[in-house]
Amino acid sequence: MPLPHSLLATSFDSGFSWAHDSYNAISLASNGRIYYVLSSDQLEAAGQMFEFDPKTNRITHLADLNGICGEGHQAHIPQGKSHVSFYEYQQKLYFATHVGYYQLIDGMDRLPVQAPDGYALYPGGHILSYDINTGKFEDLAILPEGEGCVSMVMDTQRGHIFGITWPTGKLFYLDVKSGQLQLFTAVSGSGESGTPGVDFRSLCRSLFVNPNTGIAYFSTAEGDIYQINPYSISVSRLEKAHLRLDYFGQYTPTYPGSMGYNWRQIIWYEPEQVAYGVHGNSGYLFRFDPSTEQMEVLERLTSIPSKRSGMFDQFSYGYLGFQLGPDQETLYYLTGGPIYQDGKRLEGEKQIAKGAAKGLEYLHLITYHIPSHHYQDHGPIFYEDGNWPQYVNSIAIDLEGKVYALARIPRNHQVRCDLIQINAPLSFNRP
């Protein structure tokens, strides 16, 4: 297996000096434009939403998240980020907001229970829409009890939204047509507000919908798979399928520092009527058929250097940059690759208590062509100055196959998150 060549990435300046690490929060819309949210971890600034036009390379600032939530003049912990992708339904983009300002307690990100002086507590995440024709935002619902939205998916045929709140992991369902928000009891202990070793559970970051049935699916740190049925308004655990597979590794779900047996990212693949997902820590690609509850492990989707090392990559939760390309049959995956100095692999921390990089690594672009089962590592990605994108947990592919992400960029003696585009045209070596 030959080592891949490197790819070149161009960085863009969106003009947001507070921009912090961003997760998901970038998608292609039907008008060919890329929409994204840059996060903030500051009290003084909310997250910001932008539009990028690939034809002109023009960036347009669309909104301040506090402003579109009607909270622009309120002194509270702000709407610091969106943690979810955009979903298009009837030419409106649907997404949700999340808290970005945390308290670091015992190495874990915690939702503040006491607001800083002069501020109120976080009011809760909002479910929002953006009309790509008129530019109008609409505030559809607010999540109760001051919880943010850490995961969301939309049935874009029926107008149904499903999601998971943070930090306690409550489940919710919103019917866009009726405006009715339904909350369900958490099934993952106390979620990421829990006590390590007792009721702590890392929460699933990705759900998918079977468009034939309208039922949504998510995983748990214990490796169980649950379904949310919008017709019976119920949540139930699948009896046959689970993620407690030897290839994925062994985990103690009550402790932080990994996603446990959770899948990291998962998407529906229409031609086969199944879902394809990736387990974050091990990097294994799998195929899940919800109709038969069959799980099939396919390929380790990590970079060639990672495969050769036999070691897990450095990001403690795995990577969210996993999406179908414009041909709707090729998976694109942005993942890690080890760095070697004097022939020795750079090692990071053995264990950390939150989702973060345990050490330095390169960023690789992987593709997997589903019909031919062809895996390809297109190589590590670098900026023109020799630096490379870090903290990448997002991906979007435009209509011409150009790849975008939100990444850390060294700029003016500072490092901040912004939009990048991988310039080099991909060369596919399929049989």
Image: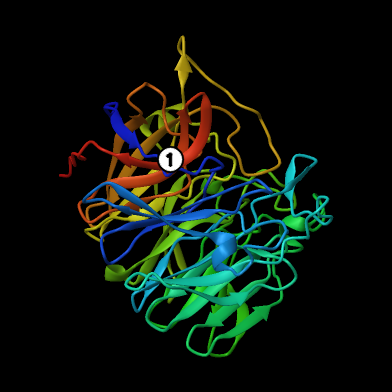
Nearest the eye: 121 or 108:
121
In the picture, measured across the screen, residue 368 lies left or right of residue 427, that is right
Q: Residue, x 30% and y 69% (percent of image)? A: 272
Secondary structure under tag 1 reads strand
Q: Is residue 426 above or below residue 386?
A: below
Nearest the eye: 278 or 426:
426
Q: Residue, x 22% and y 56% (percent of image)? A: 399
Residue found at the very far top of the displayed protein: 342
Nearest the eye: 10 or 225:
10
Quickly name the residue at label 1.
335
Pinpoint residue 397: horizontal percent, then vertical percent. 30, 52
Pinpoint residue 351: horizontal percent, then vertical percent. 68, 34
Picture quadrant of residue 181 = bottom right
- Quadrant location of the C terminus in the rendered image: top left
Q: Residue, x 47% and y 50% (percent of image)? A: 320
Q: Is residue 123 above or below residue 398?
A: below
